[in-house]
Image (cartoon, rainbow, N blue to C red):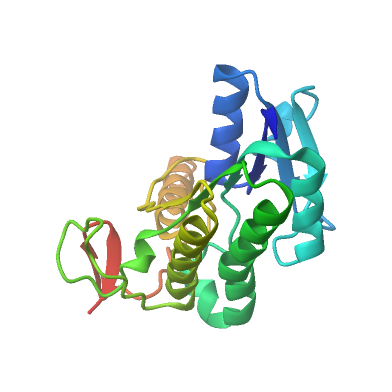
Protein backbone atom coordinates (compact mmCIF):
# COMPACT_ATOMS: atom_id res chain seq x y z
CA UNK A 1 0.00 0.00 0.00
CA UNK A 2 1.28 3.46 -0.93
CA UNK A 3 0.45 5.67 2.03
CA UNK A 4 0.87 8.89 0.07
CA UNK A 5 -1.57 8.11 -2.76
CA UNK A 6 -5.32 8.68 -3.06
CA UNK A 7 -7.23 7.46 -6.09
CA UNK A 8 -10.23 9.70 -6.70
CA UNK A 9 -12.94 9.19 -9.31
CA UNK A 10 -15.49 11.68 -10.56
CA UNK A 11 -12.97 14.51 -10.39
CA UNK A 12 -14.66 16.56 -13.10
CA UNK A 13 -17.92 16.71 -11.14
CA UNK A 14 -18.96 18.97 -8.29
CA UNK A 15 -17.94 16.78 -5.36
CA UNK A 16 -14.85 15.26 -6.93
CA UNK A 17 -13.40 18.59 -7.99
CA UNK A 18 -13.97 20.13 -4.56
CA UNK A 19 -12.31 17.09 -2.99
CA UNK A 20 -9.28 17.62 -5.25
CA UNK A 21 -9.13 21.25 -4.10
CA UNK A 22 -9.30 20.20 -0.45
CA UNK A 23 -6.76 17.37 -0.63
CA UNK A 24 -4.18 19.39 -2.52
CA UNK A 25 -4.52 22.29 -0.09
CA UNK A 26 -4.86 20.46 3.22
CA UNK A 27 -2.75 17.29 2.76
CA UNK A 28 0.46 16.14 1.14
CA UNK A 29 -1.14 13.24 -0.73
CA UNK A 30 -0.48 12.53 -4.39
CA UNK A 31 -3.90 12.56 -6.05
CA UNK A 32 -4.63 10.18 -8.92
CA UNK A 33 -7.62 11.73 -10.66
CA UNK A 34 -9.62 9.29 -12.79
CA UNK A 35 -11.22 10.52 -16.01
CA UNK A 36 -13.41 8.90 -18.63
CA UNK A 37 -12.01 9.32 -22.14
CA UNK A 38 -14.22 11.82 -23.95
CA UNK A 39 -13.91 13.26 -27.43
CA UNK A 40 -14.59 16.72 -25.98
CA UNK A 41 -12.68 17.51 -22.73
CA UNK A 42 -14.83 18.17 -19.69
CA UNK A 43 -12.24 19.33 -17.18
CA UNK A 44 -13.22 22.93 -16.44
CA UNK A 45 -13.77 22.13 -12.76
CA UNK A 46 -10.18 20.94 -12.27
CA UNK A 47 -8.36 22.80 -15.04
CA UNK A 48 -6.56 24.88 -12.37
CA UNK A 49 -4.85 21.69 -11.12
CA UNK A 50 -3.82 20.11 -14.42
CA UNK A 51 -0.19 21.27 -14.07
CA UNK A 52 0.09 20.50 -10.36
CA UNK A 53 2.77 17.79 -9.90
CA UNK A 54 0.71 16.24 -7.09
CA UNK A 55 -2.30 15.78 -9.35
CA UNK A 56 -2.04 12.96 -11.87
CA UNK A 57 -4.66 12.49 -14.58
CA UNK A 58 -5.38 8.91 -15.65
CA UNK A 59 -7.99 7.50 -18.00
CA UNK A 60 -10.40 5.17 -16.28
CA UNK A 61 -13.78 3.53 -16.82
CA UNK A 62 -15.82 2.08 -13.95
CA UNK A 63 -17.65 -0.24 -16.33
CA UNK A 64 -14.39 -1.85 -17.47
CA UNK A 65 -13.01 -4.22 -14.79
CA UNK A 66 -9.63 -4.36 -16.55
CA UNK A 67 -9.32 -0.58 -16.29
CA UNK A 68 -10.29 -0.59 -12.61
CA UNK A 69 -7.97 -3.46 -11.75
CA UNK A 70 -5.06 -1.80 -13.57
CA UNK A 71 -5.37 1.43 -11.55
CA UNK A 72 -5.65 -0.35 -8.19
CA UNK A 73 -2.78 -2.71 -8.98
CA UNK A 74 -0.51 0.05 -10.28
CA UNK A 75 -1.02 2.61 -7.50
CA UNK A 76 -1.90 0.46 -4.45
CA UNK A 77 -3.49 3.58 -2.92
CA UNK A 78 -4.04 4.19 0.76
CA UNK A 79 -7.49 5.55 -0.08
CA UNK A 80 -9.85 4.99 -2.98
CA UNK A 81 -12.66 7.57 -3.05
CA UNK A 82 -15.43 6.97 -5.57
CA UNK A 83 -17.57 9.93 -6.61
CA UNK A 84 -18.18 8.65 -10.13
CA UNK A 85 -21.67 7.66 -11.23
CA UNK A 86 -24.40 8.38 -13.71
CA UNK A 87 -25.81 10.79 -11.16
CA UNK A 88 -28.82 12.39 -12.87
CA UNK A 89 -31.91 10.63 -11.54
CA UNK A 90 -34.11 11.57 -14.47
CA UNK A 91 -31.66 10.17 -17.01
CA UNK A 92 -31.59 6.85 -15.16
CA UNK A 93 -35.01 6.09 -16.63
CA UNK A 94 -33.67 6.66 -20.16
CA UNK A 95 -30.41 4.74 -19.66
CA UNK A 96 -31.14 2.27 -16.83
CA UNK A 97 -28.55 -0.32 -17.85
CA UNK A 98 -25.77 2.23 -18.23
CA UNK A 99 -26.75 3.73 -14.88
CA UNK A 100 -26.63 0.31 -13.21
CA UNK A 101 -23.33 -0.66 -14.82
CA UNK A 102 -21.61 2.51 -13.65
CA UNK A 103 -23.29 3.11 -10.31
CA UNK A 104 -23.66 -0.46 -9.01
CA UNK A 105 -21.52 -2.87 -11.00
CA UNK A 106 -18.69 -0.33 -11.13
CA UNK A 107 -18.51 -0.38 -7.34
CA UNK A 108 -18.26 -4.16 -7.44
CA UNK A 109 -15.34 -3.85 -9.88
CA UNK A 110 -13.55 -1.52 -7.44
CA UNK A 111 -14.15 -3.79 -4.45
CA UNK A 112 -12.95 -6.86 -6.31
CA UNK A 113 -9.82 -5.04 -7.48
CA UNK A 114 -9.09 -3.89 -3.93
CA UNK A 115 -9.68 -7.40 -2.59
CA UNK A 116 -7.28 -9.02 -5.03
CA UNK A 117 -4.67 -6.32 -5.57
CA UNK A 118 -4.58 -3.98 -2.54
CA UNK A 119 -6.65 -5.28 0.42
CA UNK A 120 -5.30 -2.61 2.81
CA UNK A 121 -6.73 0.20 0.69
CA UNK A 122 -9.52 2.11 2.45
CA UNK A 123 -12.57 2.54 0.21
CA UNK A 124 -15.28 5.19 0.36
CA UNK A 125 -18.27 5.19 -1.97
CA UNK A 126 -20.68 8.09 -2.33
CA UNK A 127 -24.24 6.98 -1.68
CA UNK A 128 -27.44 8.95 -2.14
CA UNK A 129 -30.63 9.95 -0.36
CA UNK A 130 -32.35 8.39 -3.39
CA UNK A 131 -31.72 5.04 -1.70
CA UNK A 132 -34.50 5.94 0.76
CA UNK A 133 -36.91 6.63 -2.10
CA UNK A 134 -40.50 6.32 -0.86
CA UNK A 135 -39.70 7.66 2.59
CA UNK A 136 -41.51 6.47 5.71
CA UNK A 137 -40.44 9.34 7.98
CA UNK A 138 -38.40 12.54 7.98
CA UNK A 139 -35.64 13.24 8.55
CA UNK A 140 -34.25 9.90 7.49
CA UNK A 141 -31.55 8.17 9.53
CA UNK A 142 -29.48 4.98 9.34
CA UNK A 143 -32.47 2.90 10.48
CA UNK A 144 -34.67 3.96 7.58
CA UNK A 145 -35.26 1.11 5.09
CA UNK A 146 -33.98 1.36 1.55
CA UNK A 147 -36.98 1.95 -0.70
CA UNK A 148 -35.61 3.32 -4.00
CA UNK A 149 -38.02 4.55 -6.66
CA UNK A 150 -35.70 5.05 -9.62
CA UNK A 151 -33.04 3.01 -11.44
CA UNK A 152 -30.47 5.39 -9.99
CA UNK A 153 -31.70 4.92 -6.44
CA UNK A 154 -31.82 1.15 -6.88
CA UNK A 155 -28.24 1.13 -8.19
CA UNK A 156 -27.02 3.15 -5.21
CA UNK A 157 -28.87 0.82 -2.84
CA UNK A 158 -27.27 -2.20 -4.53
CA UNK A 159 -23.85 -0.57 -4.19
CA UNK A 160 -24.49 -0.09 -0.46
CA UNK A 161 -25.30 -3.77 -0.04
CA UNK A 162 -22.24 -5.00 -1.95
CA UNK A 163 -19.99 -2.62 0.02
CA UNK A 164 -21.27 -4.22 3.23
CA UNK A 165 -20.89 -7.73 1.83
CA UNK A 166 -17.23 -7.13 0.95
CA UNK A 167 -16.54 -5.39 4.25
CA UNK A 168 -18.01 -8.28 6.24
CA UNK A 169 -16.73 -11.09 4.06
CA UNK A 170 -13.17 -9.92 3.41
CA UNK A 171 -12.52 -7.58 6.36
CA UNK A 172 -11.96 -4.63 4.04
CA UNK A 173 -12.23 -1.00 5.10
CA UNK A 174 -15.20 -0.17 2.88
CA UNK A 175 -17.95 2.33 3.66
CA UNK A 176 -20.70 4.20 1.83
CA UNK A 177 -22.11 7.59 2.77
CA UNK A 178 -25.58 9.03 2.32
CA UNK A 179 -25.33 12.26 0.35
CA UNK A 180 -28.43 14.46 0.29
CA UNK A 181 -28.79 17.29 -2.22
CA UNK A 182 -26.01 19.82 -1.95
CA UNK A 183 -25.56 22.72 -4.28
CA UNK A 184 -22.84 24.88 -5.75
CA UNK A 185 -21.61 26.61 -8.87
CA UNK A 186 -19.99 23.37 -10.07
CA UNK A 187 -23.23 21.40 -10.01
CA UNK A 188 -24.43 20.32 -13.45
CA UNK A 189 -26.90 22.66 -15.11
CA UNK A 190 -29.34 19.79 -15.79
CA UNK A 191 -30.19 19.69 -12.06
CA UNK A 192 -33.29 21.68 -11.12
CA UNK A 193 -31.58 24.08 -8.71
CA UNK A 194 -28.94 25.07 -11.25
CA UNK A 195 -31.55 25.23 -13.99
CA UNK A 196 -33.61 27.69 -11.94
CA UNK A 197 -30.73 29.88 -10.77
CA UNK A 198 -29.23 30.08 -14.25
CA UNK A 199 -32.61 30.99 -15.74
CA UNK A 200 -33.19 33.68 -13.12
CA UNK A 201 -29.76 35.15 -13.85
CA UNK A 202 -30.51 35.19 -17.58
CA UNK A 203 -33.91 36.78 -16.95
CA UNK A 204 -32.31 39.49 -14.84
CA UNK A 205 -29.74 40.17 -17.52
CA UNK A 206 -32.44 40.36 -20.21
CA UNK A 207 -34.52 42.81 -18.16
CA UNK A 208 -31.51 45.03 -17.54
CA UNK A 209 -30.90 45.06 -21.29
CA UNK A 210 -34.62 45.73 -21.92
CA UNK A 211 -35.12 42.40 -23.69
CA UNK A 212 -37.93 39.87 -23.22
CA UNK A 213 -36.67 37.11 -20.90
CA UNK A 214 -36.74 33.54 -22.14
CA UNK A 215 -39.21 31.33 -20.23
CA UNK A 216 -38.06 28.76 -17.69
CA UNK A 217 -39.04 25.19 -18.60
CA UNK A 218 -39.31 22.66 -15.75
CA UNK A 219 -40.47 19.07 -15.53
CA UNK A 220 -42.83 17.58 -12.93
CA UNK A 221 -44.10 20.35 -10.63
CA UNK A 222 -46.23 18.03 -8.47
CA UNK A 223 -43.42 17.30 -6.08
CA UNK A 224 -42.63 18.16 -2.49
CA UNK A 225 -39.51 18.19 -0.39
CA UNK A 226 -39.33 15.32 2.13
CA UNK A 227 -36.27 15.42 4.28
CA UNK A 228 -33.78 16.08 1.53
CA UNK A 229 -35.28 14.16 -1.38
CA UNK A 230 -38.17 14.76 -3.76
CA UNK A 231 -41.21 12.58 -3.39
CA UNK A 232 -43.65 12.20 -6.28
CA UNK A 233 -47.21 12.88 -5.13
* Residue 217, quarter of picture: bottom left
Is residue 95 among the parts visible in the rendering? yes
Q: Nearer the viewer, residue 172 or 145?
A: 172
* Residue 184, quarter of picture: top left
Q: Nearer the viewer, residue 28 or 84?
A: 28
Query: In screen coordinates, is 12 left or right of 182?
Result: right
Tell me which residue sits at (69%, 40%) in the image. Answer: 44
Tell me residue 53's x, y (percent).
79, 22
Tell me which residue sits at (51%, 81%) in the image. Answer: 93
**Quadrant location, the C terminus:** bottom left
Tell me which residue sits at (69%, 46%) in the image. Answer: 118
Tell me which residue sits at (77%, 66%) in the image. Answer: 64
From this viewpoint, which residue is outermost toward the right? 39
Tell me residue 105's x, y (percent).
61, 70
Q: How many marks can you see?
A: 0
Query: In screen coordinates, is 97 left or right of 199?
Result: right
Tell me residue 138's x, y (percent).
15, 60
Tell me residue 193's x, y (percent).
40, 54
Relative to residue 38, is residue 31 depicted above or below? above
Relative to residue 40, is residue 24 depicted above or below? above
Q: Nearer the viewer, residue 196 or 38?
A: 38
Q: Nearer the viewer, residue 163 or 154?
A: 163
**Quadrant location, the N terminus:** top right
From this viewpoint, which residue is outermost toward the left? 137
Is residue 11 among the parts visible in the rendering? no
Amino acid sequence: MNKNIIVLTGVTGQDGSHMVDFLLKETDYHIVGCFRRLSVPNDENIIHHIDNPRFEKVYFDLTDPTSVNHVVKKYQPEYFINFAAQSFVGASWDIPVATWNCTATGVLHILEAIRTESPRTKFYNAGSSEEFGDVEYSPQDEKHPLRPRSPYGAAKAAARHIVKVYRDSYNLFAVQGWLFNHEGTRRGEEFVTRKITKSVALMSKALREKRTPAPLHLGNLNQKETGGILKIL
